[in-house]
Image (cartoon, rainbow, N blue to C red):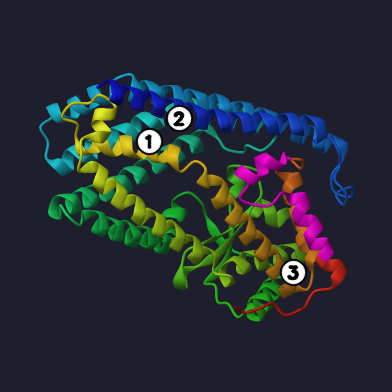
Amino acid sequence: MDSLHQYRIAILVAYLLVQGADYWLELLNLRHMQRYGRNIPEGFEKYIDENTLEKAVAYTLDKTRFGIAESAAGNILMIIFLFGGLLGIYDRWIQSLHLSFIAAGIVFFLVLQYINTILSVPFSLYNTFRIENRYGFNTMSGKLWVSDLLKSTLLSTLLLGVMTAAGLWIVRSSTEYWWLYAWGFFLVFSLFLMFISPYVIEPLFNKFTPIEGEELTERIRETMGKAGIRVSSVLKIDSSKRSHHTNAYFTGIGKVKRIVMYDTLLAKMNDREIVAILAHEIGHWKKRHILKRIVAVEVLALAGMYLAFRLLQSDLPSALFGLQNATFYAKAVIISFVAGIITFPFTALSNYISRRHEEEADRFASALTGDPESLAGSLIKLSRDNLSNLHPHPWYAAFNFSHPPVTERIRTLRSLAGQGTDNQAEND
């Protein structure tokens, strides 16, 4: 018993070290930004002035401090829940309901989700209506915020309910191989969601319309033809009803894949810059970045599912946290918590791979359009309009950035422009 208590303390210390490392990186980044953040990077002079940088520094400071406060509150509650005995009390309450294995699991996870949603409401309100308002980003009304909350809650209830019910049914039906069948189900279900999301889920929150303008449409058609790619549509999303932030993204798979651009982005970019952004998104598809990420994630998920299966067969997870007669669901929560600690270092590796993919997509777009300067200009405008930190600490960027720092991307693109680019992109 003493040894188990020591292991529990070791897990708590590991968790605190992980969170402490994360906060240390945040503070390191803030100090670096306060020292260099007001310097206009080379090549940005025509787009960004000192006032904009001053505003970007203040915005990053407010967002980071708020993020740390929100994270700290969540961590304190997590420690109380897992190490303070609340998980055992909650687990015993679930057992007292005398529900079936599947019904009890659905209630177990849904109630936790609802509690998490309720606790996140004050933070979401403050972020949206104080911080985002302060810097001129928020355009969302209180009515729309409530509507989004209700829709997302109902949607997550449906999805979590279906996944939990199906997963627990598999566990009950195949005691030896449920880890493999459950992994297969979650894989198929996630692909199914990617397929239906553009037509069923995303329209619940936004309106999608074709991009306007004959000349722009022709440029887009020509660019896609060069790449040898068929996308079901290139659409504009009415993001301005929520925020002035700008962005673009790829969604869907197979025949329903589409490229979506924020209306705020389209309003601030010229046609050449819009096409450059489109070419970058095409680059992700042509280089099979999405497929590669899915494969990598699913291989790790399969290994994780098997390890969870082995641990759930024993009483080790519950014994570590002092639980008696723990349910399958309580053990799963403990395993998930410990897994989060173990996989923390892999965040840096995942983001490194993502940055490599972004670099590949930038080079693809430059080759496809023969116009790296337009992509550079669009990235500068994106960073300016979103008040991005142009001087992140290298360690912070290495661990947390899924995209290379924008100043590095601009240098690379302009070096390509200086060398000259091939007008025809690779088709592999």
The answer to whether residue 271 is magenta is no
- Span of residues in magenta: 392-415
Which mark, by number, is residue 337?
A: 1
- Which amino acid type corresponds to the residue marked 2 in the rendered image? Tyr
Camera-side mark, 3 or 2: 2
Left or right of 418 in this view: 77: left
- Which amino acid type corresponds to the residue marked 1 in the rendered image? Phe
Residue placed under numbered mark 3 in the picture: 366
Residues marked 2 and 1 touching at CB (< 8 Å): yes
Residue placed under numbered mark 2 in the picture: 15
Magenta: main secondary structure: helix
Tell me if residue 84 can be seen: yes
Residues marked 3 and 1 touching at CB (< 8 Å): no
Quarter residue 134 falls in = top right
Q: CA distance from mark 3 to mark 2?
A: 43 Å
Q: Earlier in the sequence, mark 3 or mark 1?
A: 1
Left or right of 150 in this view: 105: left
